């Protein structure tokens, strides 16, 4: 059995490098979700913005302005809702197979799982006040 070089593997699994990967992957998620957007009455667009150590994923439209923010904060990546409420915090770790992961509440997540936790509601949950009841029956999200 060979000796695994966990020290170098962990050094390569830095929170800064993970955040850089997230920038690219969140942009791809936004592009994929935008491609799925339908026409009327869904007049909205998914947008992506990067400011320094912050990634903002947004949905904008008539009567609709929601966002999720990924922020590099020290040794962690924090995810906040539009109201600034902290939703998740992830820290870099190696799992028992030597793979780089984000640790969230004791769970070791792959980046797609972390993004899913952050973006799923933004992408697939239509706010209650966005459409009238009759529109929701005719045009389900």
Image: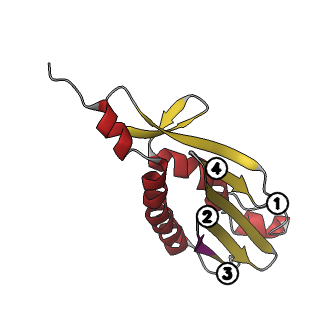
**Which of pointers 1 and 4 indicates the residue nearer the eye?**
4
Residue sitting nearer the eye, 18 or 32? 18
Marks 4 and 2, the one that precedes in the sequence: 2
Give the residue at x 66% y 54%. Answer: 121
Residue sitting nearer the eye, 118 or 2? 2
Circle 2 residue: 54
Marks 1 and 3, the one that precedes in the sequence: 3
Circle 1 residue: 128
- Real-space CA distance between mark 1 and mark 2, rounded to the nearest whole angstrom: 28 Å
Tell me the SS state at disc 3: loop
**101 left or right of 133 in image:** left
Marks 1 and 4, the one that precedes in the sequence: 4
- Real-space CA distance between mark 2 and mark 3, rounded to the nearest whole angstrom: 32 Å
Circle 3 residue: 40
Marks 2 and 3, the one that precedes in the sequence: 3
Image: magenta residue range: 46-52
- Real-space CA distance between mark 4 and mark 3, rounded to the nearest whole angstrom: 34 Å
């Amino acid at each position: 059995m060979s000796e695994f070089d966990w020290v170098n593997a962990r050094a390569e699994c830095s929170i800064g490098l993970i955040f850089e990967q997230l920038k690219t992957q969140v942009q791809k998620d936004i592009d994929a979700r935008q491609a799925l957007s339908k026409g009327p009455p869904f007049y909205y667009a998914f947008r992506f913005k990067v400011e320094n150590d912050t990634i903002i994923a947004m949905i904008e439209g008539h009567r609709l302005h929601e966002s999720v923010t990924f922020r590099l904060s020290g040794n962690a990546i924090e995810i906040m809702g539009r109201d600034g409420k902290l939703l998740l915090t992830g820290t870099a770790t190696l799992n028992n197979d030597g793979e780089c992961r984000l640790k969230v509440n004791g769970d070791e997540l792959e980046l797609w799982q972390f993004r899913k936790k952050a973006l799923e509601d933004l992408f697939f949950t239509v706010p209650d006040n966005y459409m009238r009841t009759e529109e929701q029956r005719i045009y389900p999200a």
